[in-house]
Amino acid sequence: MNKNLIIHVLFLCFLYSCHSQAGLDEACWTEPTQKMVINSQDVKFAFRWKGTHYNRGGEAFLPNNYSILCNKSKPTGSSDRYSFLLFDADMGPALSPSETNGYFKVNDDVDLLVSMVTNYGSETRLLPVKYEDNLIMDIPKLPVGSNLVSSSPAFNSKVGFSLLLRRDILGGAVTIPGNLLIATLYTVDYNFIPRPPRPDKPLAMMMTSPMGIVIPVLVECNINNGNAINIEFGRMVVNSIYDVPANYQYSQHAPLTIKCNSRLNQDAAIQLTSAVTSFSSDLIATSNKDLGVAVFHRGQLMKPYQPSPVKLVNGEALEEITLSPVKRKGVKLDGGEFTASATVVVTLM
């Protein structure tokens, strides 16, 4: 009676032991599942236009090396130093294939591509991958055993990502949600035959940080849609031209419509860049050495290279400048046509 009872207990323990390994045959995993967070430090788009890329090839996800657990039922592979892991990876359920090959739509603003380099460094795979894609990476040689503690592949130089603007950006930044699942990685022993099924537990999950990602986009502002401002002073009587900056009968007014690609409410400034006259650094030089042009903004003399304040509301401002001819004091002007040029730029304060 006692003998039968002992056999019965041992049999139950054996069944329990087998059940504990089910779904993790020849696999490596983490418990709890390791999160590899996309490295968004210093990520920015150089331009705001649709099709602009940002690429990161190293330190793309952090941490890039960590402890893992592995099961190995028998020796495999010819290497004395390494065991080789074969990857299977799914993209997160919130991501959908983009119209651009290899990319996945994150939101209306941006697409994402994740790449991984095979162990031999000569080929790149784009996620998602299946076993038949042969995405292989090495770890330290595993002995035979269960729940073996090892180190993950060194992902620092083998994983990269690219971001792609899906449309022209009218704001100053692109945002990506926090805790967004990008991809889930599974691994089994590459050298084990027949090929094991995909494990029940993943090696890692690629994620965004809980705070999400804010990617700056260059703020661009233009004046009058970038069109040249042409001023015609018309016919003037030489003796009637003032020798001091003033608003008088020969003054001409020019509207400035400022529009930015960000709907920001912010203090800004407009500034003249031009050559200046030899007789006053406050005046724009003309083709007549004895004649300059004064520019006024909001009733104040706007000197070249000196900022004059404006206020952007929803990324726009409507301003006006006044241009007045000014002659050199004490000289008699020669008649004839003259030309002058200057550039007005917008700067954010």
Image: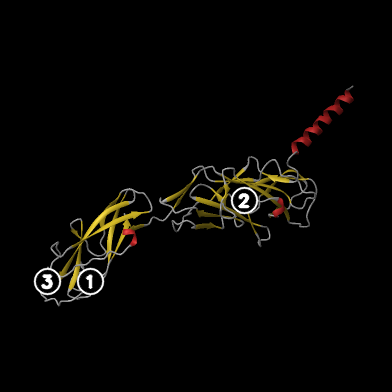
Residue 200 drawn above or below residue 309: above
User: What's the distance in space between the residues labelled 3 and 2, CA to CA?
Assistant: 80 Å
- Residue 99, position in %: x, y? 56, 53
- Residue 77, position in %: x, y? 78, 55
Is the N terminus in the top left, top right, bottom left or bottom right quadrant? top right
Amino acid carrying label 3: it is: Val
Asked whether residue 116 is in view, the answer is yes
Q: Is there a contact, CB below 8 Å, between mark 3 and mark 2?
A: no
Is the C terminus in the top left, top right, bottom left or bottom right quadrant? bottom left
Question: Residue beneath label 1, please?
Answer: 285
Residue 119 drawn above or below residue 280: above
- At a point 18% along the width and 57% down the height, the residue shown is 299
Q: Which of marks 3 and 1 is nearer the N terminus?
A: 3
| Badge nearest the viewer, 3 or 2 | 3
How many badges with numbers are in the image? Answer: 3
Residue 4, picture quadrant = top right
User: What's the distance in space between the residues labelled 2 and 1, CA to CA?
Assistant: 63 Å
In the displayed structure image, the side of residue 69 where residue 216 appears, left or right = left
In the displayed structure image, the side of residue 50 where residue 327 appears, left or right = left
In the displayed structure image, the side of residue 301 where residue 36 appears, left or right = right
Q: Earlier in the sequence, mark 2 or mark 1?
A: 2
Secondary structure under tag 2 reads loop
Question: Residue beneath label 3, please?
Answer: 237
- Farthest residue in the bottom direction? 334
Question: Residue beneath label 2, please?
Answer: 65
Q: Which of 75 and 90 is in front in this view?
A: 90
- Residue 288, position in %: x, y? 20, 75
Amino acid carrying label 1: it is: Ala
| Neighbour tally class for label 1: few under 14, some 14-19, many 20 plus, Cα within 10 Å | many
- At a point 79% along the width and 45% down the height, the residue shown is 73
